[in-house]
Image: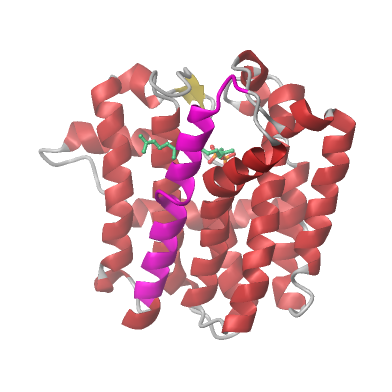
Amino acid sequence: MNIKNYLLDQRKLVESALEKYMLEDDSVFSRHIEAMRYSLFAGGKRVRPILCLAAARAISDDKINIDTVLPIACALECIHTYSLIHDDLPAMDDDELRRGKPTNHTLFGEAQAILAGDGLLTHAFEILSDSAFSKIPDAARLRIIFTIAQAAGPQGMVGGQSLDIENEKQEITFETLQTIHRSKTGALITGSVLSGALAAGASEEQLESLTLYGNKIGLAFQIADDLLNVESTTEQLGKAAGSDAERGKATYPAFFGIAKTKTKANNVVSDAVDALKGFGPEATPLRELAKYIVNRTR
Ligand code: GRG
């Protein structure tokens, strides 16, 4: 399998679905919608929606109608984009560059950027709960909504962000670092995998394996992000490089050094691939995505 071509293909699929499920900026709310669209279509890697689609295919490759999973994939990208807009605000990381472009608040102002994030988060749940968007049975849809809300909320991504901010410039234990990674970054990644699997009718046993897979790739993703922050340039990343050290953030490289961190990242990816041993060739994209997550260059 050629992961490069696969990613290009899947990104195209996600982009056109986002066009379908995102609002047009032609109403009285055009400034707000323009601000949401600006960040949503600024060229993200679309890792979370792609994981969601790949997990659905790993459960039911031959029977799944991917059109039923695309609204979920789009909702995940809306939530992820909101988190980036808010993360870049002066009150948080105060960044000027994201996805290679000026951050939302530098163009639209802080108030509109906060609202763009709020709008994207809320619109995600509008997409997920609108029965017109999806043919998934209501009981499964409710469980998907719960899974995503839990992943994005106070005991997931938002909680992790709070913990991260609370601990900035402080000596923290490795255990706290792991909790921050698991919640801030890992929760939405695992939620993306699980929501796709639920849409395809996964069994409890399959969900258990995919939870382990998601937790491992979530950790691998954050370790890779920490490494890129040290080793890449702002130009390559499309966001500020070297910012973790500047802010005195605890990271894997800060704890273990670069070489040991790379070994750890590769071990975590092997664990992720092992978690899929109960699956056949239909899970090949999930296995390749795990490797891509640590080998990516941005
Ligand atoms: C509720 C006020 C308020 C703020 C919430 C939750 C939150 C702000 C921020 C946390 C989100 C965050 C920055 C997580 C770190 C995860 C991470 C490495 C994000 C970058 O993801 P990529 O590399 O980005 O997938 P692209 O641009 O490719 O989509």
Q: Position of residue 231 (x, y in %)?
A: 77, 24
Q: Is 38 displayed left or right of 265 in the figure?
A: left
Q: Position of residue 34 (x, y in %)?
A: 27, 34
Q: Position of residue 28 (x, y in %)?
A: 10, 38
Q: Report if residue 142 lies within the magenta region.
A: yes
Q: Main secondary structure of the magenta part?
A: helix
Q: Is residue 183 above or below residue 233?
A: below
Q: Residue at x 28, y 19 (%)?
A: 109
Q: Is 51 displayed left or right of 13 in the figure?
A: right
Q: Magenta part of the protein: which range?
A: 141-170
The residue lying toward the viewer, choosing from 28 and 73, is 73
Q: Residue at x 57, y 24 (%)?
A: 239
Label count reads: 0
| Snapshot quadrant of residue 100 | top right
Q: Is 171 displayed left or right of 143 in the figure?
A: right
| Snapshot quadrant of residue 236 | top right
Quadrant in which the C terminus is drawn: top right
Q: Residue at x 54, y 73 (%)?
A: 197
Q: Is residue 42 above or below residue 210?
A: above
Q: Report if residue 173 lies within the magenta region.
A: no
| Snapshot quadrant of residue 1 | bottom right
Q: Position of residue 189 (x, y in %)?
A: 56, 54
Q: Is residue 228 at all visible to an observer of this figure?
A: yes
